[in-house]
């Protein structure tokens, strides 16, 4: 399945735990497509915190959100998602319903700036601490670009055997034969399990 199909599945997995007024996080804003999707799901009374380490991504995303009239619930943060807990307000812990990760490089941007294993795993651990019960981490990984395969393997391995306690594995795409197709991961917070 191509990137669009996988991103569509990611959106459906996130939508299943979102509602008007909910709190969502986009951990890799990029050009803002996912941020816009989240903003529409939570509506003007909800909240979306978007994080990206590249200023160019945040300005492209801001333009897209403005043009769509969907900027109201969105706060954009310039920084690394490995610092998610510091970038978001204290009150976010235990209240976020969905956190999206769309890994890799910024389409149309510098292909040398990519998400990386160490910081991606740190961000996933931080994300788990933000989730409300029933909240989800939804991630799309891209094994097709240089550095992407190693990151994808590390993330799937973390999800399979090193994810934090109380996180249930809902979906984990197996590698495809050509190894280049994007892979979806969905985890759900189920405290006490
Ligand atoms: N591959 C996707 C888009 C990924 S965009 C697609 O094809 O649609 C990935 C974004 O992650 C980029 O905008 C990049 O700037 C951002 N990024 C890279 N490292 C990051 C980090 N440590 N923290 C936050 N964002 C990061």
Image (cartoon, rainbow, N blue to C red):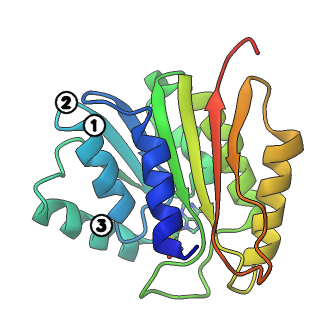
Where is mark 1, residue-wise? 42
Mark-to-mark CA distance, 2 and 1:
7 Å
Where is mark 2, residue-wise? 45
Closest to the observer, 14 or 106: 14
| Residue placed furthest toward the right | 161
Mark-to-mark CA distance, 3 and 2:
20 Å
Instruction: Please tell me whether residue 114 is drawn above or below residue 95 in the rendered image.
Output: below
Q: Quadrant of the C terminus?
A: top right
Q: Position of residue 27 (x, y in %)?
A: 51, 53
Instruction: Please tell me whether residue 144 is drawn above or below residue 124 in the rendered image.
Output: below
| Residue placed furthest toward the top | 192
Closest to the observer, 165 or 112: 165
Ligand 1 near label 1 (Cβ, under 8 Å)? Answer: no
Closest to the observer, 115 or 134: 134
Callout 2 touching callout 1 (CB < 8 Å)? yes
Badge 2 crowding class, 10 Å Cα cut-off, few under 14, some 14 to 19, many 20 or more, is few
Q: Quadrant of the N terminus?
A: bottom right
Q: Residue at x 56, y 48 (%)?
A: 138
Q: Residue at x 62, y 32 (%)?
A: 188
Query: Secondary structure under badge 3?
Result: helix
Where is mark 3, residue-wise? 61
Q: Position of residue 54 (x, y in %)?
A: 46, 71
Query: Secondary structure under badge 1?
Result: helix
Q: Earlier in the sequence, mark 1 or mark 3?
A: 1
Q: Position of residue 119 (x, y in %)?
A: 71, 58
């Amino acid at each position: 399945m191509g990137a669009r199909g996988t991103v569509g599945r990611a959106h459906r997995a996130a939508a299943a735990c979102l509602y008007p007024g909910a709190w969502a996080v986009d951990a890799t804003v990029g050009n803002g497509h996912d941020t816009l999707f989240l903003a529409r799901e939570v509506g003007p009374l909800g909240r979306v915190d978007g994080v990206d380490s590249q200023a160019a991504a945040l300005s492209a995303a801001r333009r897209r959100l403005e043009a769509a009239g969907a900027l109201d619930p969105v706060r954009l943060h310039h920084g690394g998602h490995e610092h998610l807990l510091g970038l978001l307000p204290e009150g976010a812990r235990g209240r976020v319903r969905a956190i999206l990760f769309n890994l890799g490089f910024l389409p149309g941007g510098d292909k040398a700036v990519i998400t990386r294993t160490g910081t991606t795993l740190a961000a996933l651990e931080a994300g788990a601490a933000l989730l409300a019960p029933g909240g989800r981490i939804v991630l799309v990984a891209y094994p097709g670009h240089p550095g992407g395969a190693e990151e994808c393997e590390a993330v799937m391995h973390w999800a399979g055997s090193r994810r934090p306690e109380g996180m249930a594995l809902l979906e984990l795409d197996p590698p495809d034969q050509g190894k280049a197709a994007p892979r979806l991961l969905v985890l759900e917070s189920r405290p006490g399990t």
